Image (spheres, rainbow, N blue to C red):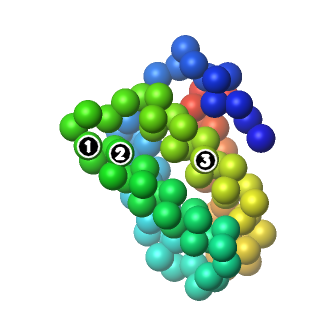
């Protein structure tokens, strides 16, 4: 797991994070699995979407949300890949947005 403090000096591109969340929502809608990890991933994506839609969005909070999604994705990756979702691409994209 990656420590969110590693990218403290790097501001998140909020527009890129928003586009990523939209793509994740779309792809998660296609996943038929209902494991606890997949549901947690859906919940975390929904929470991050609310954060990004807020006029008072904070880079720190978005970073934490992205880290949480990335960690959950890594746990749920096998199931998501089995359902045709490009999990490793999302993990890589989140890392890029976070400056990792």
- Location of the C terminus by quadrant is top right
x%, y% of residue 83? 66, 79
Residue in view at x 51 percent, y 44 percent: 65
Real-space CA distance between mark 2 and mark 1, rounded to the nearest whole angstrom? 5 Å
Q: Position of residue 68 (x, y in %)?
A: 60, 47
| Quadrant, the N terminus | top right
Q: Which mark is residue 23?
A: none
Closer to the chain start, of discs 2 and 3, is: 2
Of label 3 and label 1, which has the lower sequence position?
A: 1
Q: Taking the image as drawn, is residue 66 in sight? A: yes
Circle 1 Cα neighbour tier, 10 Å, few/some/many (<14 / 14–19 / ≥20):
few
- Residue 12 in view: no
Asked which quadrant contains residue 55, the reply is top left
Q: For mark 2, does the 10 Å Cα neighbourhood hold few (<14), some (14 to 19), or many (20 or more) residues?
A: some
The residue beneath circle 1 is: 54
- Is residue 84 positioned above or below 73 on the image? below
Relative to 90, is 67 above or below?
A: above
Q: Residue at x 60, y 27 (%)?
A: 99
Question: Residue lying furthest bottom in this view?
Answer: 32
Distance (Cα) linking label 2 and label 3: 14 Å
Whether residues under marks 2 and 3 lie with C-beta atoms below 8 angstroms apart, the answer is no
Mark 3 highlights which residue? 68
Question: Seen in the image, is 67 located left or right of residue 82?
Answer: left
Residue in the picture at 51% in, 66% down:
42
Residues tagged 2 and 1 counted as in contact (Cβ below 8 A): yes
Q: Which mark is residue 51?
A: 2
Residue 41 horizontal side relative to residue 6, left or right: left
Whether pointer 3 and pointer 1 mark residues with C-beta atoms closer than 8 Å, the reply is: no
Name the residue furthest left.
55
> Dot 3 lies on which element?
helix
User: What is the secondary structure assignment of the residue under circle 2?
Assistant: helix
């Amino acid at each position: 797991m990656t420590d969110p403090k590693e990218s403290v000096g790097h501001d998140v591109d909020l527009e890129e994070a928003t586009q990523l969340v939209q793509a994740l929502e779309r792809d998660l809608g296609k996943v038929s699995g209902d494991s606890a990890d997949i549901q947690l991933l859906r919940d975390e994506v929904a929470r991050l979407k609310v954060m990004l839609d807020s006029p008072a969005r904070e880079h720190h909070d978005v970073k934490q949300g992205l880290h949480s999604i990335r960690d959950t994705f890594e746990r749920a990756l096998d199931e998501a890949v089995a359902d045709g979702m490009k999990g490793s691409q999302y993990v890589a994209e989140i890392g890029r947005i976070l400056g990792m």
